[in-house]
Amino acid sequence: MYQYLIFDLDDTLFDFQGGEQANLTELFADWHLSPAALADTLASYHQINQGLWADYAAGRIQRDDIFARRFPATLAAQHLSGDAAALEARYHELLLSNYRLLPAATETLVNLKAAGFTLIAGTNGQAPMQHRRLDKTGLGQYFDQVYISDEIGFAKPDRRFYEPIFAANPGMNKQNALMIGDSLFSDIAGGQAAGIDTYWLQAEPTQRTPEPEPTYQGKDLKALQQFLLSD
């Protein structure tokens, strides 16, 4: 059925959200915010950051615009004063040490590799950071290939993100490739743009799925293993 498995990384294998939350909490500690104010500040950052990444994926802004604008916009929205450029620099340092894995991440890759699947990392993000995470967590050894938007020049869901992946794998086609990820916007929509089936990792797989509609969905990596190894 499937031979080529394209894995997103952040919040698919890496616990990026957990690490990000801890890093942002540390970053805003100097303001001595109340729990409610901190929660509001973090929510504001996430909304701004996600909007900028969406604009980048749609080709409306450059990648560097994200890093130049997200903290100034957050501080302005929360009426906080501070050095936004210094915040960005410190946050980048903290992110470099965000090595958290989701439960069963290593086990999943070990088992799928042993079963003969071709494992491909296909992720948006900054190349040095993603390569470092793959190295520090040990996950890099299980991937046959790694593709990062920063190096390709296009981000998911742009179908052009997938063109070098198909080019490097002559045996790969739209019937034997599967895109696996947590994001409807980048992973599921991206897989659909490339014409391949998709598997949405989502904690509540029974809920009604908004557009785009994934081919399959499951609650975690254990469920993914069961799906792929049951044949």
Image (cartoon, rainbow, N blue to C red):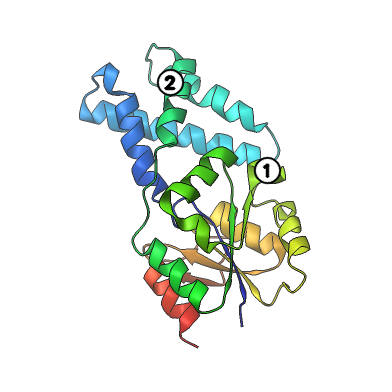
Q: Residues within 10 Å of mark 2 (few under 14, many from 20)?
A: some
Residue 126 seen by the camera: no
Under tag 1, what secondary structure? helix
What residue occupies the far bottom of the structure in this picture? 231
Q: Is residue 191 above or below residue 98?
A: below
Q: Residue 5 bears which disc, if any? A: none
Q: Is residue 139 above or below residue 94?
A: below
Question: In which image quadrant can residue 179 be found?
Answer: bottom right
| Residue 226, horizontal then vertical, whole percent | 42, 79
Q: Is residue 118 above or below residue 34?
A: below
| Residue 175, horizontal then vertical, whole percent | 69, 77
Q: Is residue 229 above or below residue 135?
A: below
Looking at the image, tell me whether mark 2 or mark 1 is earlier in sequence order: 2
Q: Residues within 10 Å of mark 1 (few under 14, many from 20)?
A: some
Amino acid type of the residue that numbered disc 1 sits on in the rendered structure: Glu
Q: Quadrant of the N terminus?
A: bottom right
Marks 2, 1: nearer the viewer: 1
Q: Residue 87 bears which disc, if any? A: 2
* In front of the other: 66 or 113: 113
| Residue 84, horizontal then vertical, whole percent | 46, 17
Question: In which image quadrant can residue 37 be found?
Answer: top left
CA gap between label 2 and label 1 equals 25 Å
* In front of the other: 90 or 135: 135
Residue 81 seen by the camera: yes
Amino acid type of the residue that numbered disc 2 sits on in the rendered structure: Leu
* In front of the other: 155 or 210: 155
Q: Residue at x 71, y 62 (%)?
A: 194
What residue occupies the far left of the structure in this picture? 34
Under tag 2, what secondary structure? helix
Q: Residue at x 58, y 60 (%)?
A: 188
Q: Which residue is mark 1?
A: 151
